[in-house]
Amino acid sequence: MIEMKVTGLTIDPFTDMPIIILKDKAGERVLPIWVGIFEANAIALQMENITTPRPMTHDLLRNVIQDLKGTVQKVVVSELKDNTFYALVYVETPGDLLAVDSRPSDAIALALRTHAPILVEESVIDRAKSLDFSSERADTERLQKWLESLDPEELGKYKM
């Protein structure tokens, strides 16, 4: 498994969908994960350290885990099937370690709130390189070039 950090959120210029950009510590591997607008908002709020007057869903989940004397040990983007990413949230409770099925966006939002490491299976990174999210190959190639050319300064300019 490879530990990765959220380096930014951006918008796919071809689909207008939010993308979470994960990058390994060395900056050699990049994994874009397309997410919904609400999940992107939850991640953006946490990245910008913005607190809401009432707990959002990911804050609620963090609070429930903590109140039950549990800790989020790590989140793992574990699979890629049919262009869909899958994740697991590892929660340690007194006497047990649970692996809870999750969407990657929810797992990442929770990891940011609990300061848990975000890990990605190497096989997921390898398979993601050959993803074809577009029905037209030219769009996929343009998107790949765009992702590779992103300036780190641009990644923080995600606006809702």
Image (cartoon, helix red, strand yellow):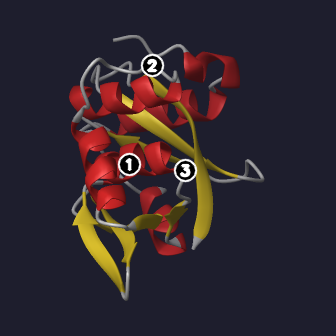
Sequence-earlier tag: 1 or 2: 2
| Residue nearest the observer in this picture, 86 or 47 | 47
Per the image, the residue denoted by label 2 is 50
| Residue nearest the observer in this picture, 12 or 121 | 121
Instruction: Give the structural element (helix, strand or loop) at label 1.
Output: helix
Q: Amino acid at mark 3?
A: His
User: Residue at horizontal 28%, vertical 17%?
Assistant: 53
Q: Amino acid at mark 2?
A: Ile
Residue 153 lies, in percent from the top left, at: 68, 18
For the residues labelled 1 and 2, the Cα–Cα distance comes to: 15 Å
Sequence-earlier tag: 3 or 1: 1
Asked whether residue 72 appears in the rendered view, the answer is yes
Instruction: Give the structural element (helix, strand or loop) at label 2.
Output: loop
Per the image, the residue denoted by label 1 is 110
Sequence-earlier tag: 3 or 2: 2
Find residue 115 and name its label.
3
